[in-house]
Amino acid sequence: MTASFCAPLSLEQTLRLEQISIALAGRELLAVDATISPGEVLTVMGPSGSGKSTLLAYIAGFLDREFTASGGVWLGERSLLNLPAEQRNIGLLFQDPLLFPHLSVGGNLRFGLPRYLNDKRQQVTQALEQVGLAGFESRDPATLSGGQQSRVALMRLLLSKPRAVLLDEPFSKLDTALRQEMRMLVFSQLREAGLPALLVTHDHEDANAAGGPVIELG
Ligand SMILES: Nc1ncnc2c1ncn2[C@@H]1O[C@H](COP(=O)(O)OP(=O)(O)OP(=O)(O)O)[C@@H](O)[C@H]1O
């Protein structure tokens, strides 16, 4: 009998930003054309108001109607433009951890888990161990330090199994020592997960730590 062989399905995909142009009140705000490989972080820098967050909103699917936009957003072979934000499989990390205040740390992490998973408890335990927060499951997020909250937010994002990640100044509210620690944690986790990521920042040290290409807007 011939054994049938199934190659493992790779979930790693490239994020392609194809000739994106966004205008506000008839004036072009930004133009971007870039390809982000799995595990790579593209950094977008530029002065305040140059359109960095607007670019993320276009990719994630919640661009305000004030703007007009054109250009493609592709995850692998799939165009995302006709999908609503919740079906794009894009993870977002902001300045604020934005943990749900009415849920425990464990509840926040379980929220990110796909519904079909049976071993939710184990996944949550492992995620907390990975970021040095073992035993924090039942804690109220409000009792955690800013750095601890950021780590929970990162693991909630990764547990939701996104296909790409957008980071909007995720380290800007952390003090210097913690910022360095979080940079290393975030970028190593993204690399390990093989996720293409786009980082918006004003900080050149963020860009250096991300280690990928840099686009300057404006
Ligand atoms: N909802 C909106 N309606 C109209 N104009 C907006 C809206 N949101 C942002 N803008 C304008 O669009 C431009 C780009 O804003 P955006 O927030 O993308 O800039 P940014 O580069 O992310 O800035 P910062 O570095 O300060 O966060 C700015 O001129 C801003 O005033």
Image (cartoon, rainbow, N blue to C red):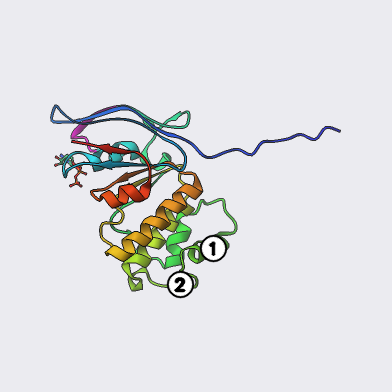
Q: Quadrant of residue 68?
A: top left
Compared with residue 92, is residue 147 higher up or lower down, i.e. above or below? below
Q: Is residue 42 left or right of residue 3?
A: left
Q: Is residue 46 left or right of residue 78?
A: left
**Mark 1: few/some/many CA within 10 Å (<14, 14-19, 20+):** some
Residue depicted at x 51% and y 66%: 129
On the question of residue 99 being in view, the answer is: no
Q: Which residues are magenta?
A: 64-70
Compared with residue 192, is residue 174 higher up or lower down, i.e. above or below? below
Residue 157 on image: x %, y % = 42, 53
Look at label 2 and name its amino acid.
Answer: Ser
Ligand 1 - quadrant of the structure image: top left
Residue that numbered label 1 is attached to = 126
On the question of residue 55 being in view, the answer is: yes
Secondary structure beneath dot 1 equals: helix
The quadrant the C terminus occupies is top left
Is 216 one of the magenta-colored residues? no
Residue 186 on image: x %, y % = 40, 54
